[in-house]
Amino acid sequence: MKKVVFKCCLSGNIFYKKGDEVLLEDSEALRLLEKGIVEIVEQEEQKQNTDEKSNTDKKPQEDQEMQ
């Protein structure tokens, strides 16, 4: 499952409007991504979490070096 945000409206069985954030099956998310209808949010959040974690890992080391 991938969390995506819609860049435009999409109607079908369910109506999505611009800015809606939903969880979609991987294959459906990739299909809509290729058509330019959605952006994948999950990967961006994971990247931010990884960056934040690496920043917090570095801070204690810097504190220890100063002492």
Image: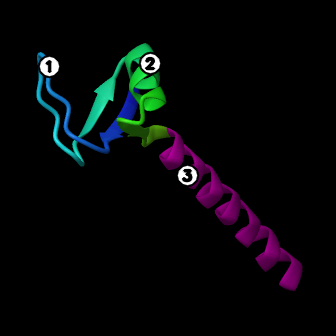
On screen, residue 30 above or below 45 = above
Say what amino acid the circle numbered 3 marks. Answer: Asn
> Could you tell me if the residues under marks 1 and 3 are in contact, i.e. CB atoms within 8 Å?
no
Write the residue at 52% across / 40% down.
Answer: 43
Task: Quote the CA–CA distance across marks 1 and 3.
Answer: 34 Å
Tell which tag, 1 or 3, sits nearer the viewer: 1
Q: Of helix, strand and loop, which one carries label 3?
A: helix
Q: Of helix, strand and loop, which one carries label 1?
A: loop
Tell me which label, 3 or 2, sits earlier in the chain: 2
Picture coordinates of residue 28 (x, y %)? 38, 17
Residue carrying label 1: 12
Quadrant in which the C terminus appears: bottom right
Residue carrying label 3: 49
Residue 6 vs residue 59: left or right? left
Residue 37: numbered disc: none
On screen, residue 47 above or below 51 = above
Q: Quadrant of residue 10?
A: top left
Task: Quote the CA–CA distance across marks 2 and 1.
Answer: 18 Å
Quadrant in which the N terminus appears: top left
Q: Quadrant of residue 41?
A: top left
Tell which tag, 2 or 1, sits nearer the viewer: 1
Picture coordinates of residue 15 (x, y %)? 11, 29
Q: Of helix, strand and loop, which one carries label 2?
A: helix
Say what amino acid the circle numbered 1 marks. Answer: Gly
Q: Main secondary structure of the magenta part?
A: helix
**Over which residues does the magenta segment extend?**
43-67
Picture coordinates of residue 35 (x, y %)? 42, 29
Considering every residue shown, the one lying at the far front of the view is: 35
